[in-house]
Image (spheres, rainbow, N blue to C red):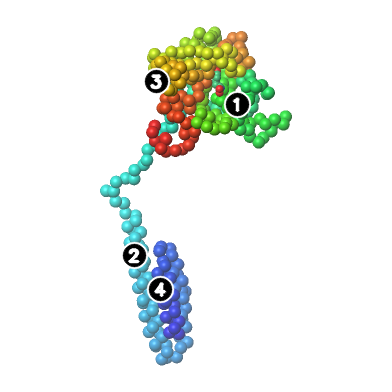
Amino acid sequence: MKNKFNQLRDEFLEQLARVKTNEHLKELELKFLSRRGRLSELMGGLKDLNVDLKKEAGELANNVKKELQEKFNALSKSLNNLVAKNNEIDVTLPGANLAQGHLNPITLVQNELEDIFSSLGFMILDGPELESDYYNFTALNIPPNHPARDMQDTFYVDYKNKDGHYDLLMRTQTSPVQIRAMQKYGAPLKALIPGRCFRNEATDARHEHTFYQVEGLLIGENINFANLKSFLEIVGQRLFGPNTKLRMRPKFFPFVEPGNNGEYTCFLCQGSGCRVCKQTGWLEIVGAGLIHPEVLRAGGIDPEIYSGLAFGFGLNRLAMLKYNINDIRLFNSGDLKFLEQF
Ligand code: DAH
């Protein structure tokens, strides 16, 4: 009997030494010290002993009980103190410093363009990144099998429409939102559409599978090439300063006619030639043109009544020029050493 009490005592103390939380301590109390716990159970057996043995074992039992209860109380007290301490707030401690984030340079140039164009009365629109083949190509006067599709390979979703064609793709340009905007708002219309685009590229310092463009369109009665020219001039001067000159060179884009590239005098050397403009004095910045009648029709606008101009900027290129960034892959890298500079 005496052995059993000593054994119980050792077992209890061993388990008590491992207790770290109040919950754990309560479990131990229930198991050993409660009315139905193991100590009570053992003491219940005392009544069956003869008088001498009962006296001796009873004394030991009482000592063990006292000892266990004391040890238990002591640990309970220190655990409670610990909890109270943890809940105390020291109002004199300095606050935790929150690291301040930075805007991605793409966001910076996008904000700048949005400011310029909203001051010219343009609304800022958004469109889906997952597009249909129709909006991304066909409606923009790039029918199936048109060679212009070759330059804009992209990522297709593994889904076929009822004709058995892969119909959903990651948009290669922001131009499909031209059609969506015409269908939704009709003419006249002035809209700027920034957004993320995707292409199946072999990536290098100048090519990236994920990049940003800004699209713009202005539709009204009698919008003509002279309007396009003066409009692009204003945009260049707002972007790069009042002395900026515009040069327009013909370029084919299926959704405009005529189409051209707008180039501006280099903001760094003012046209005399430097590293940034590759000694030409000019920077190729914007694709633009007068909206093709087929495209207006696809947008539900009558080309006999309305005409319009459209243009597209590559935001990555603008940011690279402006902030002297030499690798396009840095924009999506998530590299803080890069981002913290802006
Ligand atoms: N979507 C063209 C591209 O990705 C850029 C562009 C060119 C947009 C001419 C236009 C435009 O709206 O008129 O290369």
Between label 3 and label 2, give the one nearer the viewer.
3
In the rendered image, residue 14, in percent from the top left (x then y), is placed at 42, 72
Quarter occupied by residue 120: top left
- Name the residue tied to disc 4: 13
- Name the residue tied to disc 1: 152
Q: Is residue 185 left or right of residue 273?
A: right
Q: Amino acid at mark 3?
A: Leu
Residue 126 visible? The answer is: yes
- N-term mark: 4 or 3: 4
Q: What number is the disc on residue 78?
A: 2
How packed is label 3: few (under 14 Cα within 10 Å), some, or many (20 or more)? some
Q: Amino acid at mark 4?
A: Leu
Is the CB of mark 1 within 8 Å of ligand 1? yes
What is the spatial separation of the Cα atoms under label 1 and label 2, in whole angstroms?
Answer: 70 Å
- N-term mark: 1 or 3: 1
Between label 1 and label 3, give the one nearer the viewer.
3
In the rendered image, residue 34, in percent from the top left (x then y), is placed at 44, 72
How packed is label 4: few (under 14 Cα within 10 Å), some, or many (20 or more)? some
Q: What number is the disc on residue 268?
A: 3
Q: Is residue 1 above or below residue 244?
A: below
- N-term mark: 1 or 2: 2
What kind of element bears circle 2?
helix
What is the spatial separation of the Cα atoms under label 4 and label 2, in whole angstroms?
Answer: 16 Å
**Residue at 46% from the left image edge and 71% from the top image edge:** 31
Q: Amino acid at mark 2?
A: Ser
- N-term mark: 1 or 4: 4
**Residue at 47% from the left image edge and 34% from the top image edge:** 330
Q: Amino acid at mark 1?
A: Gln
**Residue at 42% from the left image edge and 67% from the top image edge:** 18
Between label 4 and label 3, give the one nearer the viewer.
3
